[in-house]
Amino acid sequence: MTKRSTRRRFLSHSLAAGTSLAVPAVMSGPARPSWAANDEIHIAVLGCGDMGGQHIQHFDRLPGVRVVAVSDPDLRRMNAKTAGLSHRPQKHQDFRRIMEDNSIDAVVIASPNHWHSPMGIMACQAGKHAYVQKPVSHGIWEGRQLVNAARKYDRIVQAGLQHRSDPAVAEVAEDIQTGKFGKVQWAHCMVLHTRDSIGLVTQPQPVDSEIDYDLWCGPAPDTPVLRKQFHYDWHWQWNWGDGEMGNWGPHYLDDLRHILGWNDVPDNVLSAGSRLGWNDNGETPNVHFATFHHNGVRVVVDVRNLTRNADSKEPIQYLGLVHGNVFMCEDAIVKIQRGRGWALAHDGTQIKQYQGDAGGGHEANFIDALRSGQRTDLNCEIEIGHLSTAMCHMANLSYRIGNQATVDEIRESVAEHPDAIDTLQAVIDHTRAHHLDLKATPLTLGPRLRFDPDSERFLGSHATDANAQLRYEMRSKFAIPEQV
């Protein structure tokens, strides 16, 4: 039996019977591509939201690349996002039709979060390479399963954390790691973009007839839709999304890991926050900060979606940034955000400026690695993306198993970390500016969790509760198997 017919039989059976991912497609050959240097690479984009639409246009403009197929459970969105192409790609509401097409070399996964790892695994099983948008997983276990699949089937899989291709971040990393500014004393990672409430509905909302809701849910629960806006606002509901910590957090935590030269993740995390000021259907915190301690560096991750104050529409700044990272070094303060950065003396005098491009060449880097056939040519190979995403999940897990606490209790829990104390005070001042009373609506304080980076499981106190959330119970017909 040929590889082509075996793969078609597997995927046809999956489509007809709704089997899970547990039945693997045929293992294909080595990662080296079968096309010549001047051959066209055929790409399919899975998910036609804002990022998917951008990927459709961007990849199709790259030399020697053609977007030949797209997929989305929402027919209306799929048709809208392909309108500007000069050719007519194939359109499939069910992405599994793309997986069985041997003429497609690679897929770009821009679906909702809960589909990222399952789709990536299926792509590897079907002999395809993959570009997986952030966060690369909806949980730590499935992220590791995606890495395992990439290794088993020898596929080239890029994580969509494009700052890894930003020359400004790379230059800061070199300066920090070579000790140009002395030892790093602490680091502060922040995402202070503003958001609006997603509104409140008390009854399940109808799903548009052009959306295959069963397929949209995939491995996640197919519970009724309790949000005004079907698309995007799932980010703030735990069944499908990972909050702002898992939305923008992967970008800036990956910058932090890159700049500090971390090849693993911290072995501890503590998290606090709440959803403040919004009476809506959102579940994830809009004020959330976490602390890590790793390789002698204390880190605070600071996420706040509230405007500067109750009368403003502008975002708040902290340490001079709305988003990015600040590294307090012995001889300088280094600040880096998307596309640019600065090194400042402690008196505020600028020492050096960094210019970048926000990772504009990240998609091209993926194509270059496909042509070379070497995953080592990727700027953000999937294991890098998995580890940066895992830090976000660690912060969310501590929060989700936490309990309401007083400000004094939170202050005591971070007493050993001066920047965390300052961050807590900044959060208090910020909430006061919105006329919010933290006594009436307390923050949730998660426990300090110990994490084993080798087994990727929690240890010690609270480990049982935390490990129970490393993965969620997937619907059987779309579930990731134990052995990919």
Image (tube, grey):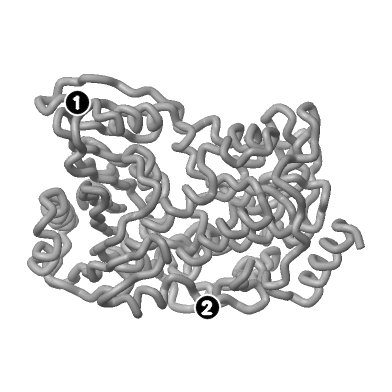
In the image shown, does 9 or 359 lie closer to the viewer? 9
Task: Name the residue rendered at 15%, 25% in the picture.
Answer: 345
- Left or right: 273 in relation to 453: left
Label drawn at residue 34: none
In percent of width and height, residue 73 lies at 68, 61
Vertical relation: 224 (above or below) 84 = below
Q: Residues within 10 Å of mark 1 (few under 14, many from 20)?
A: some
> Foreground residue, 15 or 106?
106
* Quarter-of-image position of residue 293: bottom left
Residue 72 seen in the figure: yes
In front here: 428 or 172? 172
The residue lying at 27 percent from left, 26 percent from top is: 342
How many numbered tags mark residues here?
A: 2
Q: Amino acid at mark 2?
A: Glu
Whether 479 is drawn above or below 123: the answer is below
Relative to the observer, which residue lies in front, 357 or 376?
A: 376
Q: Earlier in the sequence, mark 1 or mark 2?
A: 1
Residue 144: x %, y % from top left: 51, 61
Q: Residue at x 39, y 74 (%)?
A: 467
Q: Residue at x 31, y 56 (%)?
A: 266
Dot 2: what SS? loop
**Residue 410, horizontal then vertical, whole percent:** 14, 65
Q: Quadrant of residue 6?
A: bottom right
Residue beneath disc 2? 473
The secondary element bearing badge 1 is classed as strand
Position of 447 compared to 30: left or right? left
Q: Amino acid at mark 1?
A: Leu
Name the residue that disc number 1 marks: 344
- CA gap between label 1 and label 2 equals 48 Å
